[in-house]
Amino acid sequence: MSTGSSTVAAAVRAERTRILSELLSDLPELAVVALATMLEEIPAYAAQDATFRTDVRDQVVKHYRAKLGVLLEERTVTFEDISFTRRAAMRRARAGVALADYINAFRVGQQVFWEAVVERAGHTYAGREAALSLAAPLMRYCDFASTHAANAYMEFQQYAAAEAVRESRDLLETLLAGGLPTRGRELAAAQAHGLGPDARTPLLVVIAVLAGPAAPVPSGPDQGADALHAACAAIARTGGNGVRTLSVVRQSEIVAIPVLGSPHGAEELCDRLQGVLRGLTAEGIRLAMGVSTVAAGAAQLPQAYQEARAALDFLPEEGGVAALPRITPFQYLALKADDTARNLVDARITALLSEDRARGGVLTATIRAFAEADLNLRMAAERLQIHPNTAQYRLRRIQERTGRSLRSINDLVELLVAIALQDTLPTNTGRERLGTTTNEGRGRADVPSFHEPR
């Protein structure tokens, strides 16, 4: 090396030492600039409190000091140099900071540091060369530190998720046994899901099972997840009032316990569940959901669980939502009826209803409209959009064929029971009334208020 080259190299080295030494002296002020830039560019950081901001500034100081030490000693960064990042990463995860925001903070810190290097390098040749010589080791430090910080962040999230799942499962078993937690982590988990100490809080039990083979989720926010767990996460998002619904994968089923704002909130919850069903179907996941009646507190949850399981039997193989809050006791009894109940129906009534169903269900619709109009013929005709004389003619035909008068309460109830029983039969001709497909394998079909048509 020539004398001139040696002189230039020495000048560059001296400038490099000067730049780093100045940065070390100005380290607290530099950290303040970095924090201010993070708050300006990262909304999630700006939304945090003063304690969080102080912690971030302290971490910036530690990183800048470690970085300057590595650069001054001209060596490769090691894990021991940045061991403090593990606890900081856990604190960020615990504070709810997204991983993308956390890594973005590293980028901002690196940017502020590099701008400080360039500023102190000045306009001399030796200064600019000194700054350029720092670019590669600075990038290596940032890559190394951010990678380890991200790993620590993910490790903590996985641990926290596993703990949350374990706590949720324990809480679910306590609730399904009819109890409420009174202390410890179970109580905290209960409160996080809106399950307070009030024993009369209106609740539902939702049970969901896969209606098809389990498969990875091809799209959506849960892409790549197991279908059952992706569905569980989707159901958990149906909670209201800013809380997540307690939703747990329990062997081959999902069990969820939504909290209702009032006993009348069941209808809104059922709407949200049907929205979940549509979204999951679009992602290739088909579910069968059974929804219990409203339980008045945890003591009724064991019974509600059995109700939700029983409701699943009303669904066809392709799935759907079987929501007990949406059906009447009359419909429920018809859905639960066996062959003996059908055999008790007069053969004349069965014959009429079968023929009528094949012809479009005109007489069946007339019976329903007459009952819904409280035996008011004119009102029934208006609902059917026919002349009252036509409605009267149909009533006579029904009486002639069945021997039952629709103006007799007992006869009308018998006809309505027969219609309800026929609605549950696995026949394609009943689709107009049922509003959905049937399933011959199960011998059941859905009713409009019970399961949304597909």
Image (spheres, rainbow, N blue to C red):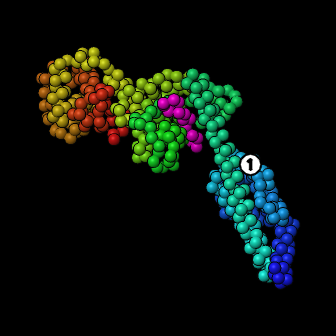
Q: Residue at x 84, y 63 (%)?
A: 73
Q: Residue at x 84, y 79 (%)?
A: 6
- Relative to residue 81, is residue 251 depicted above or below? above
Residue at the far bottom in the pictured view: 4
- Span highlighted in magenta in the image: 241-255
Visible residue check, residue 403:
yes
Visible residue check, residue 325:
no
Amino acid type at image mark 1: Arg
Q: Residue at x 73, y 61 (%)?
A: 141
- Relative to residue 247, is residue 54 depicted above or below? below
> Where residue 453 sits in the image (x, y, percent)?
33, 39
Answer whether residue 249 is magenta in the image.
Answer: yes
**Direction from residue 318 to residue 65 in the image, left or right:** right
Residue linked to disc 1 = 86
- Relative to residue 164, is residue 29 depicted above or below? below
Viewer-closest of 243 and 174 = 174
Viewer-closest of 448 and 251 = 251
**Direction from residue 194 to residue 24 in the image, left or right:** right
